[in-house]
Structure formats: structure tokens, C-alpha cells
Image (spheres, grey):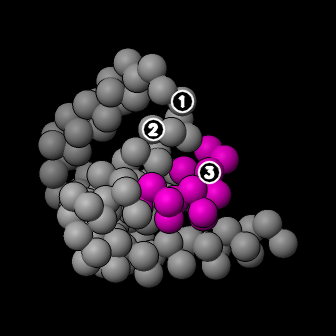
Amino acid sequence: MEPKEIMKIFSDKLPQVQGAFANMMQNISESSTIDAKTRELVMVALLTAQKSPFGVKAHGRRALDEGASIEDIISVMSQAIPIAGIGAIMDCLPVVVELEDCNECRNS
């Protein structure tokens, strides 16, 4: 299931919670002093440490949209290894391969 589909279920089943979450994320984004690409790469690293392929896929896609490369995404994911262990990147790397395949299709 794609991140957008899961977020739709979240919104349908828990609309008030989803609204509060969306507001929080918007406030964090608007108050940030870092650019959007860096912000998305930080999210990828944090979500890798949490072993969240869903989150890595969603924010990896956003990072690509903001100008990051697949290599950038894999590089920040590797930063989670000392904190979360090799298993964290192994859990999340397959979704990055999917993003890479999708990104290559968009660019050809």
C-alpha cells in the first residue's frame, strides 16, 4: 500500500487526529531554518532509525522532489547505522530501490 493510501485511511478513520498531525507538521516546516531538501533528508534518516519503510518511502519521494538524489537518500540512511544498527537500513533500503526505479522512469 502506498503512503498516500495509508494517509487517506488515517484521515478517514481519525480526521481530528490527522488534522492535528498535519497542523503540527506544517508548523514545524514553517518554523524551520533549513531548506526543504535538507529537511526531507533529515526525516529519511530519522525514519530509517525508526525502521519505518513507509516513512522512508514518503519522505524519500519528497526529498527527490526537492532535488535530492538517490545517492543522497542512501547516504543519510547510512547515518542511522551507528544508532539503530544495520537492520534499520536493511528494513528500509528496498523502498529506496523502488523510488530509484520510479525516479528513473520519470526522468527518461
Instruction: Determine which residue is flagged by label 1.
Output: 35
Residue 67 visible in the current orientation:
yes
Task: Identify the residue position indicated by label 2 in the image.
Answer: 39
Q: Amino acid at mark 3?
A: Ala
Pick out the residue farthest to the front. 82
Mark 3–mark 1 CB contact (< 8 Å): no
**Main secondary structure found in the magenta portion:** helix
> What residue do we see at 30% from left, 52% from top?
46
> In the picture, residue 70 is in which quadrant?
bottom right
Q: Position of residue 4 (x, y in %)?
A: 41, 61
The magenta span reads 63-77
Secondary structure type for disc 1: loop
Regarding residue 64, the answer to whether it shows in the image is no
**Marks 3/1: CA distance?**
12 Å
Identify the residue position indicated by label 3 in the image.
Answer: 68
Graded by Cα atoms within 10 Å as few (under 14), some (14 to 19) or many (20 or more), the crowding at tag 1 reads: few
